[in-house]
Image: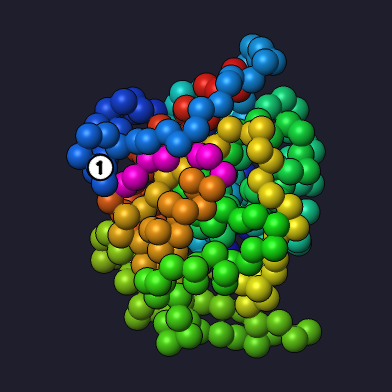
Amino acid sequence: MKSTARFKVFAATAAACGAAAASLVAVNADAATTSPTTHAPSQVSYTAKPTVVLLHGAFADSSSWDSEISYLRGQGYPVFAIDTPLRGLAFDSAYVEAQLKTISGPVVLVGHSYAGEVISQVAAETPNVKALVYVAALIPHAGDTANSLIGQFPGSQLTPANLRTVPLPGGDTDVYITAGQYGSVYANGLPGADILDSSVTQEPIAYSAFSEAATVNPPTATPKWAVIATDDHAVPTKAQEFEAQRVGARITYVNSGHDVPATRPGAVDCAIIAAADSVR
């Protein structure tokens, strides 16, 4: 862990979302976003801004959201970044649900990568989650696993040759990306020094997490946004697109590798602000 604190609040300065969005590279020449479906704004009027809760995925920790935290706090949003244990969908979802019980008022829940599974499960069980933002994320339906979601389209480099496994007491196994392949699999687009640092400090995920099935669908009535990476070597772009369209998410495409929170924070900022605006 980069920090021993599991539940953290950050404060920093802000930049303009519109200016950040101007630098995005879209797949379509006409626009950076598409809206497969539209959702009516919440019927409840809130005077305060919703709390934004950020969940990292596999091979990362909450510090991966540093840029987004700075921006959102500068805009006056309460922000929490949770260091999830990465022990599996049921365990991690219960952990996050316990944390959300300490937050009053509406929540915008944001998940990167594997955390897309977690926020889907949590939102189905937590009434104050009012919007979901998926960032290069897995978006399951009941019965889906991380393996099935990643493997439904070709292109993932999360293959045995690129992974390092460590057997644990009790029978489970921790999974890391091998240091030499970390830049290609996970962090393409980041500076070399950042790739080296992240490859050393990466957080492992339990091997069993890849085969644990979702038990619920993301709640249909909860509005959703998805930031899709077009140069992702971990979760294929086609998989991200299929899953986002299946749940009716508003989609933004960005030219990025898998670590979108670090390489294209402006896109993430804007998706979160749009989600927050839908519940205010």
Tag 1 secondary structure: loop
Q: Is residue 53 above or below residue 55?
A: above
The x, y position of residue 62, in whole percent, is 54, 52
Give the camera-side residue of 192 and 155. 155
* Residue in view at x 62 percent, y 72 percent: 210
The x, y position of residue 65, in whole percent, is 47, 47
Residue 50, quarter of the rendered image? top right
* Residue in view at x 66 percent, y 46 percent: 218
Residue 79, quarter of the rendered image? top right
Please provide the residue range marked out in magenta: 247-254
* Residue for badge 1: 28
The x, y position of residue 103, in whole percent, is 73, 33
Amino acid carrying label 1: it is Asn
Q: Is residue 52 above or below residue 16?
A: below
Q: Is residue 13 above or below residue 217?
A: above
Instruction: Please state the total of marks drawn on the protein image.
Output: 1
Residue 29, quarter of the rendered image? top left
* Image-based side of 104 in relation to 45, left or right: right
Mark 1 is surrounded, within 10 Å at the Cα level, by few (under 14), some (14 to 19) or many (20 or more) other residues, namely few
* Residue in view at x 66 percent, y 32 percent: 221
Q: In which quadrant of the rendered image does the C terminus lie?
A: top right
Q: In which quadrant of the rendered image does the N terminus lie?
A: bottom right
